[in-house]
Amino acid sequence: MAWKTMDIQEQRVRFVVAAAPRTRGFSSLCGEFGISRPTGYLWLRRYEELGVRGIAERSRRPHRNPRRTADSLEQRVVELRLRYPDWGARKLSVLLARE
């Protein structure tokens, strides 16, 4: 017997369709799909608000990074790298510190 394959989007749609009429117990339905109750409520809420588009896979990339290098400093490092291609990070940091 072959394994039954199902992509994430299809699983979410099937869950939402099964959960929408609210005829079955929510906990047992979540257990059947192998998800937690908070995840089930999240999918259901997103589906009610945005439709099928709302339960699509979302990016996990952070909205911001507080440790990101400033754009001006990044540009200056690139300029120095192009000017002195053989210099390493230590020499470049000393040169940047002098400025």
Image (tube, rainbow, N blue to C red):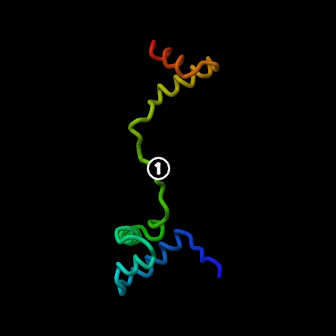
**Residue at 49% over, 19% down:** 93
**Residue at 44% over, 66% down:** 54
Looking at the picture, how far across and down is residue 35, in whole percent? Answer: 42, 71
**Residue at 43% over, 82% down:** 18
Q: Quadrant of residue 86?
A: top right
User: Above or below — where is 61 with respect to 31?
Assistant: above
User: Above or below — where is 93 with respect to 39?
Assistant: above
Q: Secondary structure at mark 1?
A: loop
Looking at the picture, how far across and down is residue 45, in whole percent? Answer: 36, 70
Q: Quadrant of residue 39?
A: bottom left
Q: Is residue 78 left or right of residue 1?
A: left
Looking at the picture, how far across and down is residue 68, in whole percent? Answer: 44, 35
Name the one closer to the observer, 36 or 51. 36
State the residue position of label 1: 61
Return the residue found at the far bottom. 23
Q: Quadrant of residue 15?
A: bottom left
**Label 1 amino acid?**
Arg
Q: Is residue 82 left or right of residue 43?
A: right
User: Above or below — where is 95 with respect to 54?
Assistant: above
Which corner quadrant holds the C terminus? top left
**Residue at 45% over, 16% down:** 97
Looking at the picture, how far across and down is residue 95, in whole percent? Answer: 50, 14
Name the one closer to the observer, 52 or 8. 8
